[in-house]
Amino acid sequence: MKEFHGAATARFDISAETVFDAITDVDRLPSWNAAIEAVAERPDSLANGAEWLVVMHPPHLPRWRSRSRVEEIDRDHLRFAYETRNADGNPSYVKWTWDVVPDDGGADVSVRWDAYLKTMDRKLMAGPIRRRQLAREVSHSLEALAAELGS
């Protein structure tokens, strides 16, 4: 497997701006994404090119550090995109894109991930495992975010 892709959507019964602000608040990530154990480094502000580092610990996998870099943060259009790489220097990466669309006083959220596997261990083992896990994890994260925001 050289790459894999996925997407998830959710409806929130709160303002789109509130949802977008929560998604882009790096410090809050561990509270709604169960695969993130902790935020190890955070930028002073989240802008294009800013980076943060998290400790990942999905169920049934060892811990690892993951570094993300903002590619787009557009509060006017409620779009957030970033690239994530394992902090060990592996060249494999995942591109994440979040879109929040205002709808009748609430918000429709869609998230897409595109993983590009560059090394044999990622292509044969880690990639297929993470593909299956992400399909569940992202939906659970969206549910947890909705619960946290009272939506």
Image (cartoon, rainbow, N blue to C red):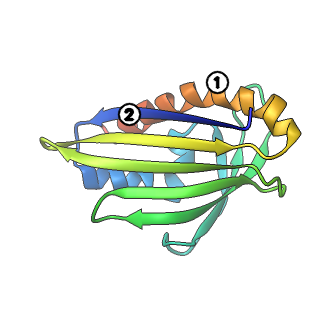
Q: Is residue 92 left or right of residue 10?
A: right
Q: Amino acid at mark 1?
A: Arg
Mark pair 2, 1: CA separation: 17 Å
Q: Is residue 122 left or right of residue 37?
A: right
The picture quadrant where one finds residue 50 is bottom right
Q: Residue at left 12%, top 41%?
A: 104
Foreground of the two, 76 or 120: 120
Foreground of the two, 50 or 60: 50
Q: Amino acid at mark 2?
A: Thr
In terms of sequence position, does the residue under pointer 2 or pointer 1 come before the other?
2
Query: Element type at marker 1?
Result: helix
Q: Residue at left 47%, top 29%?
A: 139
x, y percent for residue 114: 58, 43
x, y percent for residue 145: 42, 39
Q: Which residue is mark 2?
A: 9
The vertical placement of 112 against 93, above or below, is above
The vertical placement of 55 against 80, above or below, is above
Q: Residue at left 52%, top 65%?
A: 71
Foreground of the two, 87 or 147: 87
Please give the label number shown on residue 132.
1
x, y percent for residue 100: 32, 48
